[in-house]
Amino acid sequence: RIPCSRFPVLNLEPWRVGAPLQSVSDDDGPNDSEWSTWFPRYTRGGLELSAAETFNYVLSHRTDEVCREVLDTETRIVNGRAQVRFQCPPGTIRYSDYPQIETEQLYWTDWIDNVTPSRRNKDDDESRVPDQVGCFKPFAIQAQTVDGVPAGETGESFMEFSPTLGLICHGIDQV
């Protein structure tokens, strides 16, 4: 890992228009696609949503983490609960564990740790509290484990992961 201080201030515009920042390949071949992170199969009225319904939810609530043209889906079961991820054309997922936002108008706040996952179910609720950090209109979110592993590299599923809502992990959804 390279500390952020080693990089000069970068132009944010390419990131906003969807320039590729993260590409994931499950093999050593060419990157003709990329996979989103894993998402829990959300529920409505106590019923688990289908992969298509989960996609629609993610597309409307976590737009940078998935593309509009899904090539394929994968599902897995973790602790008896379904999770799904989406295969997309390369460069169409705008999410990055390292969003570049260092400008005069935008800056990173200090790290926040509201709840260490030590509850009975190992849930972690880092919901955003605006006056906690003095940031009332957040632009991006970054999260990592206590060991410094970026959230997107853990292979885990997050119930919420957004600048406006914060980070919420349910222990039962974790590998």
Image (cartoon, rainbow, N blue to C red):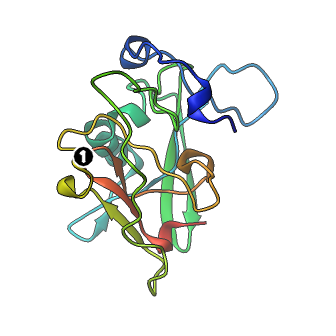
- Give the total of numbered labels: 1
Identify the image quadrant of the N terminus. top right
Q: Residue at x 17, y 44 (%)?
A: 136
* Relative image position of residue 146 (x, y in whole percent): 58, 62
Question: Which residue is situated farthest in the bottom direction here?
Answer: 120
> Which quadrant does the C terminus fall into?
bottom right
Residue to which mark 1 is pinned: 164
The amino acid at mark 1 is: Thr
Residue 160 figure quarter: bottom left
Observer-nearest residue: 163 or 56?
Answer: 163
Compared to residue 92, the image places residue 11 above or below, namely above
Q: Residue at x 49, y 67 (%)?
A: 173
Please give the name of the residue rendered at 18% of the width and 55% of the height, measured from the top-left corner.
Answer: 131
Mark 1, Cα crowd under 10 Å, few <14 / some 14-19 / many 20+, is: some
Position of 134 with respect to 123 (left or right) is left
148 lies above or below 87: below
In this rendered view, identify the residue nearer to me: 7 or 150. 7
The image position of residue 7, as x and y in percent, is: 58, 23
Where residue 120 appears, as percent x and y from the top left, is 46, 87
Residue 22 percent coordinates (x, y)? 58, 28
Q: Is residue 117 left or right of 112 when viewed as pictured?
A: right
Q: Is residue 77 left or right of residue 47?
A: right
**The residue tagged with tag 1: helix, strand or loop?**
loop
Residue shown at the point (48%, 50%) measured from the top left: 143
